[in-house]
């Protein structure tokens, strides 16, 4: 049985594409292209050098766009008022702080909340796998001798599986030097895993709240403790992420009708979401 769509607003009230969305998209494309050019050894201050950053920028922006449109299209399908994606440019090592959409009307029930929360990570995960697959095909296997220093990327199960499929067994003493498209796919998996952490109103928070209701706060608390432990002993970045999620809020707001339970299909997709998290999660994403 298909869920009923709830039209909380007339066509005139729907959130349209505004100048700020376009401007932020363009700026984020420029910052990711700038970083991609630097990663490829090009001069980002020249047009020829800047072009070298296009593969990375297009791949990463594509992954982020697919993720957000998963949320956006699902929300619009159910009549939930939502904005177009806001992309966030940033002068950091990847060129962006990601993207987000804003829900501007209440969620009718847990089934709709689940679908909206699940659609983004699922779509982004598939897009990340595609980018990672084609990116690893063009990435080089290099000797670890003479390449010490700099930043090393942590791995995850999805990446290990794709490397095995595409490259086979990597010889001892060698590693894969990820190309720009593969790096964008790896970042997409990292973003997927971080969004699936069930704290507050993350995608994982939406999903867990849909399944366990008020007990979601207990899971959020346990995950904060887990992030603190990982941040203390594995990768300090998890401490920052735990702080940010805690400050934003660990509790999830209620839906309008909390008494409609999830059906079997969505309970199955709940375990799919857990598998996506396990495949995408890297305990130590960056090693210096």
Image (tube, rainbow, N blue to C red):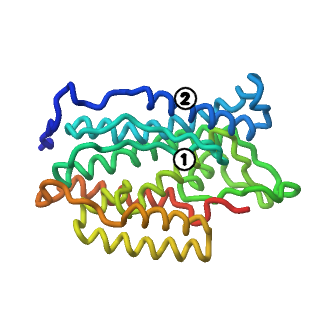
How many residues crowd around disc 2 within 10 Å: few (fewer than 14), some, or many (20 or more)? some
> Camera-side residue: 96 or 279?
96
> Camera-side residue: 48 or 124?
48
Which of the marked residues, 2 or 1, is nearer the chain's N terminus? 2
Q: Could you say which quadrant of the image residue 221 lies in? A: bottom left
Query: Which element carries disc 1, helix, strand or loop?
Result: strand
Query: Which element carries disc 2, helix, strand or loop?
Result: helix
Residue 258 in percent (x, y) is at 14, 59
The residue sitting at 38% across, 36% down in the picture is 69
Q: Which mark is residue 258?
A: none
The residue sitting at 60% across, 43% down in the picture is 90
Left or right: 178, with 264 as reference point: right
- In the picture of the structure, the residue carrying the numbered disc 1 is 97
Residue 240 in percent (x, y) is at 55, 65
The residue sitting at 44% across, 59% down in the picture is 277
The residue sitting at 77% across, 25% down in the picture is 46
Residue 276 in percent (x, y) is at 43, 55
Image position of 52 with respect to 132: above or below: above
CA gap between label 2 and label 1 equals 14 Å
Left or right: 81, with 97 as reference point: left
Residue 187 in percent (x, y) is at 57, 48
Image position of 114 with respect to 240: above or below: above
The residue lying furthest to the top in this view is 47
> Camera-side residue: 192 or 220?
220
Image position of 273 with respect to 236: above or below: above
- In the picture of the structure, the residue carrying the numbered disc 2 is 26
> Camera-side residue: 91 or 257?
91
């Amino acid at each position: 049985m298909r869920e009923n769509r709830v039209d909380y607003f007339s066509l005139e009230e729907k959130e349209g594409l505004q100048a700020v969305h376009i401007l932020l998209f363009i700026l984020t494309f420029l910052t990711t292209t700038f970083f991609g050019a630097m990663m490829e050894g090009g001069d980002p201050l020249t047009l020829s050098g800047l072009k070298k950053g296009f593969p990375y920028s297009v791949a990463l922006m594509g992954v982020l766009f697919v993720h957000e449109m998963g949320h956006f299209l699902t929300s619009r399908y159910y009549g939930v008022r939502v904005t177009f994606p806001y992309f966030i440019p940033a002068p950091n090592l990847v060129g962006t702080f990601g993207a987000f959409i804003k829900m501007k009307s209440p969620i009718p029930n847990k089934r709709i909340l689940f679908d909206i929360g699940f659609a983004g990570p699922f779509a982004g995960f598939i897009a990340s796998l595609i980018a990672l697959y084609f990116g690893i095909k063009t990435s080089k296997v290099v000797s670890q001798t003479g390449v010490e220093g700099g930043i090393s990327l942590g791995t995850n199960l999805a990446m290990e599986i794709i490397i095995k499929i595409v490259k086979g067994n990597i010889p001892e003493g060698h590693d894969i030097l990820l190309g720009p498209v593969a790096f964008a796919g790896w970042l997409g998996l990292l973003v997927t895993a971080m969004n699936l952490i069930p704290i507050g109103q993350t995608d994982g928070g939406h999903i867990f709240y849909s399944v366990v209701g008020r007990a979601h706060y207990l899971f959020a608390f346990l995950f904060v403790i887990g992030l603190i432990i990982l941040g203390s002993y594995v990768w300090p970045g998890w401490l920052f992420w735990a702080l940010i999620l805690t400050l934003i809020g660990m509790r999830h707001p209620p839906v309008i009708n909390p008494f409609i339970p999830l059906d079997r299909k969505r309970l199955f997709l709940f375990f799919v979401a857990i598998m996506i998290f396990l495949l995408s999660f890297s305990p130590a994403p960056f090693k210096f």
